[in-house]
Image: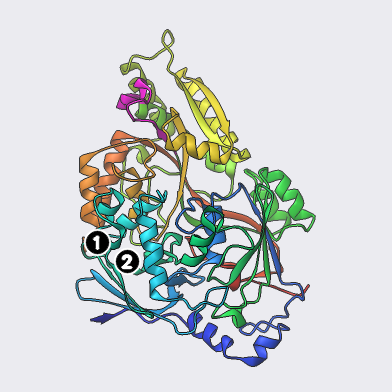
Amino acid sequence: MKHAPSFSMAALLATTIAASPLWAGSHATHPATGEALADDQTFTYRQLDEFSSVDPQVVEDVSGAEVVRDLFEGLMNQDADGNLVPGVATGFEANDANDVYTFTLRQGAKWSNGDPITAHDFVYGWQRAVDPALASPYSWYMELMSIRNAKEIIAGDKPITDLAIEAIDDHTLRVHLTGSLPYFATMTTHGTTFPVHRATIEAHGAEWTKPGNIVSNGAYVLSEHIPNERSVRVRNEMYWNNDATIIDKTVALVINDENTALTRYMAGELDRTEVPAGQFPRLKQEHPDEAISFPRLCNYYYTFNLSDNGPEEFKDVNVRQALALAVDRRIITENILAGGQPQAFTFTPAATAGFEVPDVAIASMTQAERDAKARELLAAAGYGPGNPLKFSMIYNTAENHKKIAVAMSQMWKQKLGVEVELGNLEWKIFLETRENQDFELARGAWCGDYNEASTFLDLITTPSGYNDGKYSNARVDELILAARTSTDTQPLYTEVEQILAEEMPVIPIYHNAGVYMIDEDVGGWPVDNVEQNWYSRDLYKLAK
């Protein structure tokens, strides 16, 4: 057996703090930095939309995932730099083939009701994630983790008890994979793999996540939830490292409009909010210690509906190529967003660990060359002044999404004579519309579930649960499958990106940056974690 790499000093510090009776009784100063702490340790932030769920096996959006990471804890966590650190598991071992992983769970970890956390809770949660009866929107993630029998169970061909995860005893969990997966442990920081409290689910059914019903094992418990308005999470006194937690309460306010959110931030109602499109240069000049921008492991794109009921026009690769070429990404990133977002010509961001952005033809062309090629391709497809290309495109409610969609439609109109009908949908309706392929061209965005290129490229494989455009290419499927067990994935990912650039099932627009206003009295924000897996328990409020 070979041991996992040693953990960072962050875990050691957390253990030391937890053992300190002085720290447990006083929050006068930060134990590591010595900074004076505020009496009121409440962190309030803006949330764009109502989250999809706080059920770990049901949640499918970024906002919900942020809440779930506070309410629940999986086998492993991340530190401020994105490194793997202990969660419920104190460590793990992998065999030489990297296809069997054994996790050791910490003694004394408890649910918020005082029940002990055992390996059986993880078995139950993982079986639930692949259970066709639940129809988890993230069941595909369990298959992506290469857990033996996951694929067959999701398809309904095997019972959930055949999932190759076993509780050796209450504090030992073993997982068998279909093949070598060196980064398997990093995937256990994702909410889908978190444990859930079986007795609570069986007692309350679909109502189990409501305040008053929910039993969780993270650093916080859900104390209040008013849909489309606010949710509040407060410290879980049963959490194994509660003595090291500084933030007492985290409040998420749903504010759809970014400018309204900025106004409320300036009024002191929020500790963190996103910077509205185009306003970062001004805010950075006026508030240099509060306006920040840093790379994020996310992309922003538009996806064509290539399913059987998708528009016939998009079946022609010339049309897809023409539309992608005519988008002037520099106008979007520099004039509309102006927050440090890089243009995107590949699906996978450069911030992805171990990934080198390959050369694709569209990236090396000037915009004038792209525009000329776009006109040529659209004419070859049979569209022009007497027969304009017409279609609709949808996006979810947000000012920056609207600005980008309007800009793209104007570019296509001016350069190619294309006529576009824009549609703005509320978040949940938007998700359902995409999932049901009830669209022609739709906005898409993805933040990596783990830091490896497959977290993005798997989305455009045939079986992916989030392949909303239903693009299918046998070679892409073959390459991504091979990459799961390859010791040299770059040539495989390069070929996939080149295929995408040629067939253009999606239009990459830009790769994200975290562009925030964060109050100067907030400490501990993990700006160096490109996945932005943040935990309220790592934050703190400074005395003013």
Q: Which range of residues does the magenta coloring cover?
A: 302-319
Question: Is residue 290 at least partly visible in the picture?
Answer: no
Residue 427 on image: x %, y %: 56, 41
Q: CA distance from mark 2 to mark 1?
A: 13 Å
Q: Is residue 413 magenta?
A: no
| In the depicted structure, whether residue 541 falls above or below residue 285 | below
Which residue: 31% across, 36% down?
471
Residue 441 on image: x %, y %: 44, 30
| In the depicted structure, whether residue 421 falls above or below residue 12 | above
Tell me the residue that label 1 is attached to: 148
For label 1, the SS is loop
Location of the C terminus (image quadrant): bottom right
| In the depicted structure, whether residue 14 falls above or below residue 202 | below
Q: Which mark is residue 184?
A: 2
Q: Nearer the viewer, residue 172 or 101?
A: 172
Question: Is residue 417 at least partly visible in the picture?
Answer: yes
Location of the N terminus (image quadrant): bottom left
Residue 406 on image: x %, y %: 57, 29
Mark 2: which amino acid?
Answer: Phe
